[in-house]
Image (cartoon, rainbow, N blue to C red):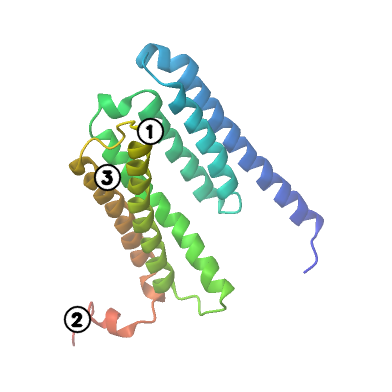
Amino acid sequence: MKITISDWKGAKIETLRRIGVSLVSLLIILIMSKVLAPIIAPNSELFDQVGMALAIVALSLLLWRFPIGTYIMAQMFTMSAAAGSILKLYDMFPGYDRVVHFISGVILGYIGYTIGYYIVKRLELPPERFVIIFIAGLFSFACAGFWEIIEFMTDCVMHMGVQHSNTDTMGDIVAGYLGGTLFQLVKFIEHYKEFRFERIRSLFKHSD
């Protein structure tokens, strides 16, 4: 396939957009750390500030080739998590943590959807939306559990007290699962007419 000048310009613009989003995200983290934290959360830790900045960089690299919408949503989610840890919103608003985990379930669903589509295309399988949505849900659910494992290991090694209790841990997992389930439900409704599983569709039809 021959690459035209318009394709090259489009790719260049797309690259600049992604760099711009990442730089804005880092700027917001910097403002949180150096301007807002001394006022709102004087006990904010340098570990959280540096960690969230590195998370932005890592996320930018991992999701560089993902759709720009997913890329932006992931960056926005990281900034919301940064506000929770840097500005101590997790402590000020107990429900904030649940909301962040719920949103993470939705965003991870989008990431899983892209991965599922790539896998199906790579294996040259029929692009069945039902399978792709199923993979997206599994990815979101797996990440919700894996993140809590990481927090548990962090507490065991560094004794940071990230996981306050079993109820807190399970609540975070449930919130992430609900977010992933919502993503699946929305995608099922969006692509319902494309599904080839006539038996499933027939369950929702009225008999004559």
Q: Nearer the viewer, mark 1 or mark 2?
A: 1
Q: Which residue is mark 2?
A: 206
Percent coordinates x, y for residue 172 in the rendering:
27, 45
Element marked by disc 3: helix
Query: Mark 1: which amino acid?
Result: Met
Left or right, 132 with respect to 173, comes to: right
> In which quadrant of the rendered view does residue 17 lie?
top right
Q: Compare marks 3 and 2 and give the one earlier in the sequence.
A: 3
Element marked by disc 1: helix
* Mark 1 to mark 2 CA distance (whole Å): 59 Å
Residue 17 vertical placement versus 113 (above, below)? above
Query: Mark 2: which amino acid?
Result: His
Q: Which residue is mark 1?
A: 158
Q: Nearer the viewer, residue 173 or 11?
A: 173
Percent coordinates x, y for residue 199 in the rendering:
28, 85
Left or right, 78 with respect to 152, comes to: right
For mark 3, does the 10 Å Cα neighbourhood hold few (<14), some (14 to 19), or many (20 or more) residues?
A: many
Q: Compare marks 1 and 3 and give the one earlier in the sequence.
A: 1
Q: Residue at x 31, y 50 (%)?
A: 176
Left or right, 35 with respect to 196, comes to: right
Q: Nearer the viewer, residue 196 or 102?
A: 102
Q: Nearer the viewer, residue 27 or 17?
A: 27
* Mark 3 to mark 2 CA distance (whole Å): 39 Å
Question: Residue furthest toward the bottom?
Answer: 208
